[in-house]
């Protein structure tokens, strides 16, 4: 069934549920235009600069970090709970070493508003254009976060993506709840 355009805020509850129960997926493309999915556990959504914005945090060591800095856009995709093994794979293997779309049998779904594609097997997809990035300032970050999250270095970069388009399966809520 073809996905339909929806309000970016409509399925935020399910995105949050994914983030806290195994992870959601971010897709970006590398310099050869090969798409690379990566599992994320951290993201936030709201309004900034009078526009819908989805924010993700990506460590400098990730292949996704290179991709995001190359292309300037990304998609955030909500997997169905039944595809947990895919989320595990994309959260433990790097696109530097394998093609995760091929290894997981995922289908590339071209986006309309950005160059990074979505994943056809996912229920909701936000197409985001990076409008701002920020690296945490450890002088102003709460000390307990500096020691617990960044004790070993490998900082996150925070990517603010303006949501250009959001699509979802028409029966997403029913299938997600099964
Ligand atoms: C549940 C889960 C959540 C994760 N969340 C993030 C995240 O928010 N940011 C991040 O940089 N890495 C996160 N990771 C780690 C990356 O997904 C993992 O290192 C991945 O293999 C990187 O892939 P890449 O090198 O192809 O970008 C998470 C991993 C798991 C399993």
Image: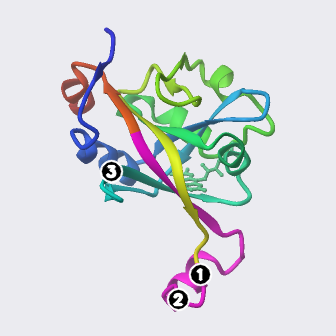
Density class for disc 3 (Cα within 10 Å; few <14, some 14-19, many ≥20) is few
Query: Dot 2: few (<14), some (14–19), or many (≥20) neighbours within 10 Å?
Result: few
105 sits to left or right of 2: right
Task: Give the farthest residue toward the front.
Answer: 50
Name the foreground residue: 10 vs 88. 10
Residues marked 1 and 2 touching at CB (< 8 Å): yes
Measure the C-alpha gap from mark 1 to mark 2. Answer: 6 Å
Q: Is residue 130 within the magenta segment?
A: no
Secondary structure beneath dot 3 equals strand
Q: What SS does tag 2 mark?
A: loop
- Foreground residue, 59 or 67? 67
Q: Which residue is mark 1?
A: 137
Per the image, the residue denoted by label 2 is 140
Reading the image, the residue beneath label 3 is 51
Image coords of residue 85 (percent x, y): 52, 34
Say which of marks 1 and 3 sits in front. Answer: 3
Looking at the rendering, the stretch of residues picked out in magenta corresponds to 137-163
Query: How packed is label 1: few (under 14 Cα within 10 Å), some, or many (20 or more)?
Result: few
User: How far from the left and from the top, in percent, is residue 23?
Assistant: 45, 47
Residue drawn at (50%, 40%) of the image: 25
């Amino acid at each position: 069934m073809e996905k339909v355009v929806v309000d970016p805020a409509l399925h935020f509850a399910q995105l949050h549920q994914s983030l806290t129960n195994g992870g959601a997926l971010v897709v970006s493309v590398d310099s050869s235009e090969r798409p690379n999915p990566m599992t994320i556990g951290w993201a936030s959504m709201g309004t900034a600069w009078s526009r819908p914005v989805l924010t993700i945090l990506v460590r400098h060591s990730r292949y996704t970090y290179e991709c995001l800095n190359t292309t300037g856009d990304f998609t955030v995709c909500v997997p169905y709970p039944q595809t947990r093994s895919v989320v595990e794979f994309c959260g433990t293997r790097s696109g530097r070493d394998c093609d995760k779309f091929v290894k997981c049998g995922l289908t590339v779904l071209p986006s309309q508003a950005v160059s990074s594609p979505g994943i056809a097997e996912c229920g909701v997809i936000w197409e985001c254009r990076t409008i701002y990035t920020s690296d945490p300032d450890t002088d102003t970050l709460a000390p307990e976060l500096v020691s617990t999250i960044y004790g070993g270095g490998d900082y996150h970069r925070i990517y603010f993506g303006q949501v250009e388009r959001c699509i979802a399966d028409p029966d997403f809520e029913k299938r997600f709840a099964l």
